[in-house]
Amino acid sequence: MTRIKENTITFLKWICVSVIIGIILGFLGYLFHIALDFVTEIRTGNMYLVWFLPIAGVVIFGVYKICKMENNKGTNCVIMSVRKEDKPPLVLTPLIFISTVITHLFGGSAGREGAALQMGGSVGYFVGSKLKLDEKDKTTATMCGMSGAFSALFGTPVTASVFAMELTNVGIMQYSVIVPCVLCAVTGRLIVQGLGVLPTLYKVLSFPQLSATTVLKTVALGILCAVVSKIFCMVLQKTHTLYEKYIPNKIVAGVVGGLIVAVLTFALGTGDYNGAGTQIIDKAISGEAEIYAFALKILFTAITLGAGFKGGEIVPTLFIGATFGCTVSPLLGLSPSFGASVGMISLFCGVTNCPLSALVMSVELFGGQGLALYMVAVAVSYLLSGYQGLYSSQKIIYSKTKME
């Protein structure tokens, strides 16, 4: 009876805490979603704004400097807080909100999940502190916030819940946080949905039948996607290292990086690689993509984020995976549309080391059809992508090849 009582009290506590955090992040996610759509529309209608990206880099650094957050580790800070190695300050929420909007307005190549995880983690930790939770429960509140914000922005509550539990320590799932993470993710999604923002869904034009042949073809595509995921992570890391070595002054780095992106944009004569690039993902799922698009997105994203602009890497990852899968899959005898979807899921798994999140994402984005083939691609990508990823603070607890 004592255990039943304790579990009931804990359950009721986390219903209240997770719903409170979910409501806050639902409204915050809605405002962020509207802001990003608004500035993206302005930029696409006025491409000359990209020439102001160097100035935007100075402004972003200045804002962080004023708030004494110029050395903040971003998403890595939130991941470290889950292991009690750091504390995500609440000021991180307005900082990442504003700086990500500025990055998108002036054409930096970045996503939005970095902002989601940082806003969610900092809000979750703040609410936990105000409710006088103990340190372990503050950690749970932080993970709860991560799932709520991710769900509010991406419209994938199940993926958000699993991702928050799977991301920090690969190989160990903290099931003790499943109730708060799920309730917060669903609450955040319901708030945004109630305000008129529909979840992200893609219609794959055709799915191949499950057979030995299609499995082998999917394995081949998964192998190639694992290679691309390694290349993407290495380019991001190498670019960051080059900035630190040759342009250690962060203001100068922002100016130089912004100028390079602007020059490349107008040299190519297209804005496809500025911002998140969700319209290109839509085209790839419809079976249309340039063969070089994935490589250019890697380049634009590395230059942007390495220079200190804010946002995230997940949406660029989906862009890279969709365009790569779309163009390579016909060579393997798979449809471009299905190949694009496999590329998105495989790249996501490869760069985050989160296979369960990737598999669940395939269901939420594309429906349940083709699940076995998605699982094949995810498994292959996870194994062959190695031990690096987007987040340096992520720990891979168990070997990918042995039970150790």
Image (cartoon, rainbow, N blue to C red):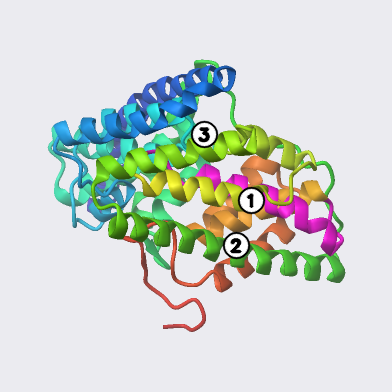
Label annotation for residue 86: none
Question: Is the residue marked by circle 3 packed among few (<14), some (14-19), or many (20+) residues within 10 Å?
Answer: many
The residue tagged 1 is 294
Give yes or no for residue 329 being in the magenta stretch.
yes
Q: Is residue 315 visible?
A: yes
Identify the amino acid type marked 1. Answer: Phe
* 321 with respect to 155 (left or right): right
The residue tagged 2 is 228
The magenta stretch spans which residues? 310-335
Q: Position of residue 242 (x, y in %)?
A: 36, 59
Identify the amino acid type marked 3. Answer: Gly
Answer with mark 3 or mark 1, whichever residue precedes in sequence. 3
The residue tagged 3 is 275
Q: Quadrant of residue 17?
A: top left
In 3D space, how far apart are the residues under numbered discs 1 and 2 (Cα atoms)? 9 Å
Q: Are marks 3 and 1 in contact (CB under 8 Å)?
A: no
Q: Position of residue 287 (x, y in %)?
A: 80, 43
